[in-house]
Image: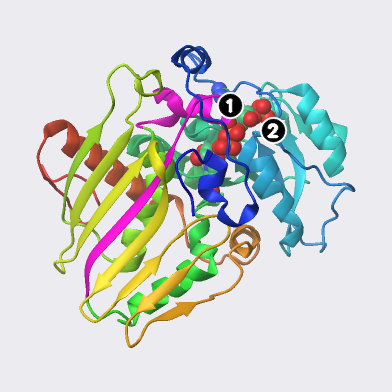
């Protein structure tokens, strides 16, 4: 199980044989790595550690495959998503966008990307006439999602954007409007909607396998140490928002919604940051919230960047409980239904979630299939995040409209 001292990668990659990162926190080194609030722009970073590039360039499988430009060659893009394109039926990497020319060329050579399909942030606009690129995948720090999604729409491309969609509901609204103006698709990369255990959990709850849902508890936590570029921007408010909630807690937030199939009518929340800790000079260390649903069900959500690792979802109903632990990792999901004697589900291989997410977006582009995780879902979630922070700041319960805006 994930324990104290496990790295961010370990939080998500239970089955992946992860080495525990040294979390020796010297306050000096942590402070030195924190990007200044002024650097809210796309800036190239060094190659992440332990990246395995393909031995031979992958090939697209079908003639009608959609070419994606990957924007931001960081940890998640290089270690998780780009290697999974080969498992997708109709998606391939057609272009790269990076602020680090050396990394761009190394990755470009390994993936067989033509030189004229390797862009910097400065030359990105030149991607517009490139017919090989139909979609842009934004894998940048979260505070840059809105700007680069809008730029991709301006270049006439469809956009797959990483979670959280943006850092405010106003940004989300602008992104949706930009997509509509450009007549292009927008999908948020909520991979749990394509992961077999989470899909089965949705189905089990929908058919009342645990009776009527009464209490939902979620926790997504790990102890962070900004000693790598990937964690560096995650302590900068302008690039990350409030912190763990947008990054990790959003998985619990999503589960609370897709397992109850309801919108909360009220939220009360608290935030915490330990005094004098440079990791938390701009962001919260911990966010907890309690949601009340119209059915009477209650959800308790906790997320932390400063506690031992956890990633679980417990849904307790009138006749049983669904235990998912780990719930939303890259792999290694475990799910048990404690009802009628108890039963463990092996719902399928969790690692298919990455390729299925890509193929779903391609189905939306090619066939007009309705997007399961559209921009409107990302907007809803940012509204809920805003309600959580508003409740914590005001020290009182906030009441919500059905569209997750705060009732005045
Ligand atoms: N769905 C999931 O399971 C999942 C998991 C992890 C992360 N994510 C999301 O993916 C996005 C990227 O996360 P990550 O963990 O891959 O981060 P990361 O390792 O730090 O990579 C981000 C990349 O963005 C580029 N970048 C441009 N401007 C930057 C700036 N000012 N500061 C830092 N990087 C900058 C850099 O690429 P170049 O050097 O090539 O320019 C950098 O390597 C985030 O939105 C995160 O929430 C999703």
Q: Residue at x 57, y 43 (%)?
A: 9
Reading the image, the residue beneath label 2 is 49
Q: Quarter-wise, where is residue 104 in the image?
A: top right
Image: 350 above or below 273: below
Residue labelled with disc 1: 228
Whether 219 is among the magenta residues is yes
402 is higher (above) or lower (below) than 180: below
Residue 333 locus on image (x, y percent): 51, 64
Q: Is mark 1 within 8 Å of ligand 1?
A: yes
Image x and y of residue 332, in percent: 56, 62
Residues at marks 1 and 2 touching, judged by CB atoms closer than 8 Å: yes
Q: CA distance from mark 1 to mark 2?
A: 9 Å
Circle 1 residues within 10 Å: few <14, some 14–19, many ≥20: few
Q: Is residue 125 at all visible to an observer of this figure?
A: no
Query: Is residue 139 found left or right of 118 in the rendered image?
Result: left
Left-right relation of 243 to 265: right
């Amino acid at each position: 199980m994930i324990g104290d001292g496990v790295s961010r990668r370990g939080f998500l990659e239970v089955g992946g044989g992860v080495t525990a990162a040294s979390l020796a926190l010297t306050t000096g080194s942590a402070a030195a790595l924190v990007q200044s609030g002024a650097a809210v722009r796309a800036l190239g970073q060094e190659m992440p550690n332990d990246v395995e590039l393909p031995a031979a360039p992958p090939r697209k499988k079908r003639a009608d495959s959609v070419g994606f430009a990957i924007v931001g060659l960081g940890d998640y893009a290089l270690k998780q998503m780009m290697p999974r394109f080969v498992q997708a039926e109709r998606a391939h990497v057609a272009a790269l966008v990076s602020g680090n020319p050396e990394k761009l060329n190394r990755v470009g050579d390994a993936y067989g990307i033509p030189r004229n399909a390797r862009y910097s942030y400065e030359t990105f606009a030149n991607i517009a006439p490139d017919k090989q690129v139909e979609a842009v995948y934004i894998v940048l720090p979260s505070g840059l999602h809105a700007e680069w999604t809008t730029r991709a729409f301006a270049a006439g491309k469809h956009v797959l954007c990483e979670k959280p969609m943006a850092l405010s509901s106003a940004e989300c609204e602008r992104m949706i409007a930009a997509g509509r103006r450009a007549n292009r698709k927008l999908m948020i990369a909520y991979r749990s909607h394509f992961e077999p255990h989470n899909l089965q959990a949705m189905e089990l709850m929908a058919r009342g396998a645990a009776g009527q849902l009464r209490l939902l508890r979620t926790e997504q936590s790990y102890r962070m140490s900004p000693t790598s570029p990937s964690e560096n921007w995650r302590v900068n408010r302008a690039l990350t928002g409030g912190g763990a909630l947008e990054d990790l807690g959003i998985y619990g937030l999503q589960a609370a919604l897709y397992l109850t199939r309801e919108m909360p009518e009220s939220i009360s929340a608290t935030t915490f940051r330990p005094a004098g800790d440079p990791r938390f000079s701009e962001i919260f260390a911990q966010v907890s919230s309690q949601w009340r649903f119209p059915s009477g069900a209650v959800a308790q959500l906790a997320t932390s960047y400063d506690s031992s690792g956890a990633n679980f979802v417990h849904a307790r109903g009138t006749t049983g409980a669904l235990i998912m632990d780990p719930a939303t990792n890259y792999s290694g999901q475990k799910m048990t239904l404690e009802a009628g004697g108890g039963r463990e589900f092996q719902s399928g291989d969790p690692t298919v979630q990455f390729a299925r997410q890509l193929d779903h977006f391609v189905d939306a582009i090619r066939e007009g299939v309705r997007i399961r995780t559209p921009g409107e879902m990302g907007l809803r979630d940012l509204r809920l995040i805003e309600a959580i922070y508003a409740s914590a700041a005001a020290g009182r319960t906030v009441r919500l409209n059905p569209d997750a805006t705060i009732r005045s």
